[in-house]
Amino acid sequence: METIRFEELEIAEPILKAILEMGFEQASPIQAKAIPAVLTGQDIVGQAQTGTGKTAAFGIPLLQSIDTKSKNLQAVVLCPTRELAIQVAEEIRKLAKFLHGIKVLPIYGGQEISKQIRSLKAGTQVVIGTPGRVMDHMRRKTVKFDHVKMIVLDEADEMLNMGFREDIETILKEMPEERQTVLFSATMPKPIMDIARTYQKDATVIKVVKKELTVPKIEQYYYEVKPKNKEEVLSRLLDMYDPKLSLVFCNTKRQVDELVTALQGRGYFADGLHGDLKQQQRDRVMNGFRNGKTEILVATDVAARGIDVDDVEAVFNYDIPQDDEYYVHRIGRTGRAGRTGRAFTFVVGKEVYKLKDIQRYCKTKIIAQPIPSINDVASTKAEKLLDKINNVIENEDLSKMIDIIEERVNREDYTSLDVAAAFLKLSMGESEQIEQNNPNYEDFGNTGAEAGMVRLFINIGKKQNARPGDILGAIAGETGMPGKLIGSIDMYDKYTFVEVPREYASDVIRVMGEAKIKGKSINIEPANQK
Ligand SMILES: Nc1ncnc2c1ncn2[C@@H]1O[C@H](COP(=O)(O)OP(=O)(O)OP(=O)(O)O)[C@@H](O)[C@H]1O
Ligand SMILES: [Mg+2]
């Protein structure tokens, strides 16, 4: 595709300077098409994939339309959530850095209204707000729309989903007839086009059409899981891919809270975001995620729309999204502005059919993946560590270290290979110690009813005719584990497992395989869960 430079788009000098400072090198396709169109003053519907710069596509012409000599309110942007309002205001402020005399104000619920009123009174030309709070100011007559030239509905379809239809319609009716109305989103379901027909005049639709609705640079995978395994699978994927920042979407607030507790219990830096939190808490959580203190943000769909955080390398659909469109917006939190990303979706049972619908809607392929075993996680972790070592070997002076190792190796009866292996094991942490004779294994983490326990899948061979008590007795006898410590054993047709305290897991594994459990002469094999 032809590249368009911002200089070719008739953008005012101070704004160009700001764009340069923001590090944008060329206009994205939606920017190249929408900026000139919005500048002509016509009504526009703009659709382009997530993370392709729609904010600046309306933000640049919006700023250019402001008369800086007047202190009247001249442009309004409506966003579905406070987080998005804050972010859009931030981006527009950056674009306005060299435009003197422009005030850009985010207004949203939860923030002290008197403070907002003071700022509005002092003269604000651009307001970025959530529909509820903007309505509130409209009713109090603390905003006046008489001089508004342009209104932007960012994520209009989501505002409708959230029940803001009436508010939006009331706001639009209050605005001058001859204003410009602009809509932007990555998805354009029918209700949006209805709004467009009712409230826009001969709108021009600008679609940057791509084959698929999702960003091609996002690798998309799915995993068939059992509900009770989701937490473990999530942990394995987090350990294996080690994303800098991750966003995990759940369908309910309760699930968000539960998962945050579970992840924190497992030692992850996780935090939760949903609509039941107090406004200050929401700000605290969002800031923690933006500055990297929180590495895993668990959220409901409040964080699905428009949120732009650098370094979100993975998105997890812990629960499959209820609407096809949500899939697009959720996974679009990664792979932004040309970067790569990964999206992982968990499906339970019949949900695979929902996944089919999603793929059809997005015109994309979501690839099935087996759940990584503990061994897969460990080898990926080892690979990553070794990659880091490469760097050290190539770039650092190791002579002193080599002397120390050499001295040790000469003194003891082992090789430098042994030393390297031992170091690798140490740096991978304790959890990998129970790998060797690894049956499929599930760790319950440190919270919940089964805290501290692990479940080991085993095979007992039908011919042995062993009863549960025999097996528990045999394990206890062989490992020295007090019998009462074995949580439980379950024997089904297809699989059998024992649940034991984590610290005994490696002992139980040790007696499996070749070893016979002597006390009762029962042979226990490691098994794969099926
Ligand atoms: N021309 C550009 N060159 C490089 N980066 C850009 C450019 N335009 C915007 N960006 C950056 O790309 C990121 C994504 O932009 P933005 O949030 O506007 O995407 P969007 O299209 O609105 O996505 P969504 O559909 O998720 O709301 C932002 O960090 C923004 O600063
Ligand atoms: Mg956006």
Image (cartoon, rainbow, N blue to C red):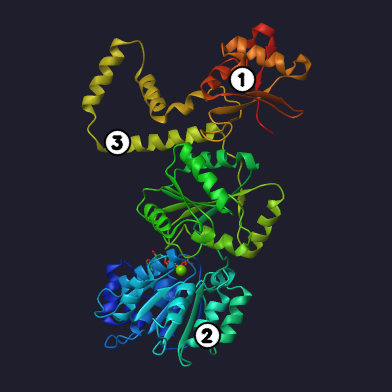
Number of disc labels: 3
Which mark's residue is nearer the viewer, 2 or 1? 1
Q: Residue at x 24, y 76 (%)?
A: 98
Q: Is residue 425 visible?
A: yes
Q: Residue at x 45, y 52 (%)?
A: 313
Q: Is mark 2 within 8 Å of ligand 1?
A: no
Q: Judge the density around disc 1: few (<14), some (14-19), many (≥20) Cα neighbours within 10 Å.
A: some
Instruction: Find disc 2 in the rendering and name its residue.
Output: 204
Q: Quadrant of the C terminus?
A: top right
Q: Residue at x 33, y 71 (%)?
A: 115
Specify which label sits upstream in the sequence, 2 or 3: 2
Q: Amino acid at mark 2?
A: Thr
Specify which label sits upstream in the sequence, 2 or 1: 2
Q: Amino acid at mark 1?
A: Ile
459 sits to left or right of 31? right
Instruction: Find disc 3 in the rendering and name its residue.
Output: 392
Q: Is mark 1 within 8 Å of ligand 1?
A: no
The answer to whether 145 is drawn above or below residue 420 in the figure is below
Instruction: Find disc 1 in the rendering and name its residue.
Output: 486
Q: Amino acid at mark 3?
A: Val
List x then y, in percent, for residue 289.
40, 53
Q: Quadrant of the N terminus?
A: bottom left
List x then y, in percent, for residue 330.
53, 59
Q: Quadrant of residue 283?
A: bottom left
Q: Is mark 3 within 8 Å of ligand 1?
A: no
Which mark's residue is nearer the viewer, 3 or 1? 1
Q: Are marks 2 and 3 in contact (CB under 8 Å)?
A: no
The answer to whether 170 is drawn above or below residue 379 in the figure is below
Q: Is residue 3 visible?
A: no
List x then y, in percent, for residue 159.
54, 71
- In front of the other: 443 or 488: 488
Which mark's residue is nearer the viewer, 2 or 3? 2
